[in-house]
Amino acid sequence: MPGALRAFKSKFNIPFHFLSDAKKEIGKKYGVNRILFSARKTFLIDENGILIYIIDHVNLNTHPRDVLAIFEAEKLSDQSNYIKE
């Protein structure tokens, strides 16, 4: 994981892993690659590898808090076997 992501994770005490996609291979599979930059999206994947939530519109000021709130809500829910947007 690049240093910037490691620092971000540490600063906000984020309890889950990030994926850095420098070669844009995963972004291509998820359909987020653009000509110059990839679209800012967050995909929450549970411990079983199931995609449980997609955040399409990322607000950089609130994003860490938003992700943690969704993560906690999904953790408390038994319905984590479907995708929400």
Image (cartoon, rainbow, N blue to C red):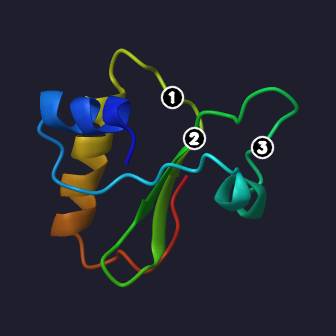
Residue lying furthest left = 13
Q: Residues within 10 Å of mark 2 (few under 14, many from 20)?
A: some
Question: In front here: 51 or 38?
Answer: 38
**Circles 3, 1 touching at the beta carbon (< 8 Å):** no
Question: Please, what secondary structure does the residue beneath circle 2 have?
Answer: loop
Distance (Cα) linking label 2 and label 3: 10 Å
Q: Which amino acid, mark 1?
A: Val
Mark nearer the viewer, 3 or 1: 3
Query: Residue 79 placed where, x, y %?
Result: 34, 76
Q: Amino acid at mark 3?
A: Asn
What's the amino acid at mark 2?
Lys
Residue at horizontal 81%, vertical 26%? Answer: 36
Residue at the image position 35 percent from the left and 15 percent from the top: 61
Above or below 70: residue 41: above
Mark carried by residue 58: 1
Give the mark count. 3
Q: Is residue 82 above or below residue 71?
A: below
Q: Nearer the viewer, residue 39 or 7?
A: 7
Place residue 47 in its image quadrant. bottom left
Label 3 sits on a secondary structure element that is loop
Does residue 38 appear left or right of residue 18 in this picture? Answer: right
Query: Label 1 neighbourhood size at 10 Å, few (<14), some (14-19), many (20+)?
Result: some
Where is mark 2, residue-wise? 41
**x, y percentage for residue 54?**
53, 52
Residues tagged 2 and 1 counted as in contact (Cβ below 8 A):
yes
Q: Are marks 2 and 3 in contact (CB under 8 Å)?
A: no
Given the current orientation, which residue lies at the most extreme bottom position? 48
| Label 3 CA crowd tier, 10 Å (few <14, some 14–19, many 20+) | some
Q: Which residue is mark 3?
A: 33
The answer for how far apart the CA atoms under marks 3 and 1 are is: 15 Å
